[in-house]
Image (spheres, grey):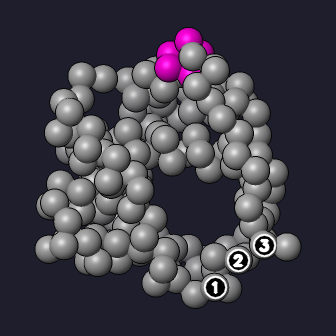
């Protein structure tokens, strides 16, 4: 996507830290296997701001900003600030798509993983709504052209 080496390093760090704000959430939310209540969703939607608050001053300001905005949607329906389109940093839009792909293709407490094909179709269905269509196109091309780069990791959840 034409991202510089410097921005690739920023992206790498932000991607590793994007959900650190979940450390502030109660275990009852993190380990929930059912639907979250509205009050639980309100708490969950605060994790980008909590992560930003943890990171600002200790990490590059671009890293903190990407982490803050990684749940913003291209159509403005995201959180925490409801920004949209190009107001969302490109690196945040990349983290958003990668995070969505990972969430779908990894097993969760409340459901199993979906196939790569199903995940790509879902990403494409959200292109222009939640997700940046150019980032969705890029991940689709990358995965479609190099399936040997994909690795399935074992589920390491405690039994």
Residue at 76 percent across and 56 percent down: it is: 155
Quarter of the figure with residue 59: bottom left
Vertical order, 10 against 63 (above or below): above
Q: What element carries label 3?
A: loop
Quarter of the figure with residue 146: top right
The residue beneath circle 1 is 27
Residue 50 horizontal side relative to residue 9, left or right: right
Confirm or deny contact between disc 2 and disc 1 (CB under 8 A): yes
Residue 11: which numbered mark, if any?
A: none
The residue beneath circle 2 is 31
Q: In which quarter of the image is the C terminus?
A: bottom right
Residue 93 position, x and y percent, is 35, 41
Vertical order, 56 against 141 (above or below): below
Residue 70 position, x and y percent, is 37, 54
Residue at 30 percent across and 45 percent down: it is: 11
Q: Distance between the residues labelled 3 and 1?
A: 14 Å
Residue 62 position, x and y percent, is 18, 54
Label 1 Cα crowd, 10 Å radius (few <14 / some 14-19 / many 20+): few
Confirm or deny contact between disc 3 and disc 2 (CB under 8 A): no
Q: Does the rendering let one see residue 76?
A: no
The residue beneath circle 3 is 158
Q: In which quarter of the image is the N terminus?
A: top left
Q: Using the image as rendered, state which of residue 133 and residue 66 is in the foreground.
A: 66
Residue most extreme to the right: 159
Please provide the residue range marked out in magenta: 141-145
Q: How far apart are marks 3 and 2 (CA)?
A: 12 Å
């Amino acid at each position: 996507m034409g991202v510089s080496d410097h921005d690739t390093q920023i992206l790498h760090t932000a991607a590793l830290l994007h959900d650190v704000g979940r450390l502030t959430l109660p275990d009852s939310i993190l380990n929930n296997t059912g639907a979250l209540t509205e009050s639980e969703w309100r708490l969950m939607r605060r994790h980008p701001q909590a992560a930003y608050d943890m990171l600002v001053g200790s990490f590059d300001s671009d890293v903190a900003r990407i982490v803050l905005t990684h749940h913003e949607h291209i159509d403005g329906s995201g959180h925490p600030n409801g920004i949209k389109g190009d107001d969302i940093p490109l690196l945040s839009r990349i983290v958003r798509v990668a995070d969505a792909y990972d969430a779908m293709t990894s097993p969760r407490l409340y459901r199993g993983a979906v196939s790569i094909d199903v995940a790509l179709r879902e990403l494409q269905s959200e292109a222009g709504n939640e997700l940046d269509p150019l980032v969705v196109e890029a991940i689709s091309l990358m995965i479609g052209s190099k399936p040997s780069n994909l690795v399935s990791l074992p589920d390491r959840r405690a039994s």
